[in-house]
Image (cartoon, rainbow, N blue to C red):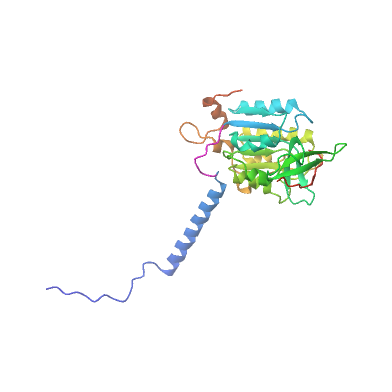
Amino acid sequence: MGKSKKPSNKRSNLFSKKQLVIILASALVVVSSVSAALLLQPRSGTTAFPLTAGIIDQLGEELPNPSFVANATTILENHGFNVTYNNGTIDVAFYSRLAQLNYGIIILRAHAALREDNSTVDLFTSEPYNPSAHVGVSGLAEGFLNYSSPVKTYFAVTSEFIENLQGSFPRSIVIAMGCNTLYSNLTQMAQAFHDKGAEAFIGWNGYVADVNTDAETLLMLENLVSNNETIGDSIHGIYDVSYGSTFACYPQSIQDLRISDLVPNKSGVSATVQDVSLFVKISSDTTKKKMKISGN
């Protein structure tokens, strides 16, 4: 008959202290690398980035620029985007549908304004302000276009309005051409678009003139779309010569994103923007909040 041994109370040391330190340090490096990589990656999910673009020209009647519209459209269409031009009445009703229009790139050629207390930034509509209209709709403001004489007032939409939109932005890149759209640390509007699905929000960190924002936005589009540069590189060196303002992007972690990172080719691998055109058919109770605006 065999004999059994009493279990020993001693445990063998699988690793030395030195080895444990090396293993733990290596694990931390791996975790940190993975975390950093995840921050730089576009958000995951089933939402597909569409090759559609919307030019929202709230300035189209007051400060028309057909050359900007034509050139922006050409840049986008040459690289596979189906472009829709929206002007005329960019009213509250239009903004309420914005998250249902399925635009991959949204160009907001629209006035934006700092609140009088500099607490946040809002986007102008072209709908004259009427205290009897849109009663009960949250997230609206009274915007004053105070460089006109007499001063004109319009409805403006706030970040709260964007947060409450029906629908979502399909990993969109939002380009807000108005003044102060990414002023200092006022990221409420950018965050609202991001929370509704937008991948990136590009805007100005100060005041801009309409002719300058038109010209500089075209340069940025060339960088971003035609040259397939990263968002960070595409906005580098873009500035308004009148006020010294520059383009900024939100969130900061998206600076290394390229358009091609959002567009899978037929095999599911990221394609260059030039490749895209090979397989995509190209078709041509209202709360009063007073604001101030200057420039664009």
Placement of the N terminus among the 4 image quadrants: bottom left
Q: Can residue 254 be seen in this view?
A: no
In this rendering, the answer to whether 290 lies above or below 3 is above
| Span shown in magenta | 43-50
Seen at 64% across and 35% down, the residue is: 106
| Residue 125 x, y percent position in the rendering | 73, 37
Q: Can residue 67 be seen in this view?
A: yes
Q: For this view, does 231 lie left or right of residue 124?
A: left
For residue 168, which quarter of the picture?
top right
Seen at 71% across and 50% down, the residue is: 186
Q: Residue furthest right?
A: 149
Seen at 68% across and 40% down, the residue is: 235
For residue 61, which quarter of the picture?
top right
Residue nearest the viewer, comparing 25 with 44 = 44
In this rendering, the answer to whether 267 lies above or below 196 is above
On whether residue 237 falls in the magenta region, the answer is no
| Residue 166 x, y percent position in the rendering | 59, 40
On whether residue 47 falls in the magenta region, the answer is yes
Q: How many labels, in total?
A: 0
| Residue 174 x, y percent position in the rendering | 65, 39
Q: Which residue lies furthest to the left in this view?
A: 1
Give the overall secondary structure of the magenta segment.
loop
Residue nearest the viewer, comparing 56 with 74 = 56
Placement of the C terminus among the 4 image quadrants: top right
| Residue 69 x, y percent position in the rendering | 71, 27
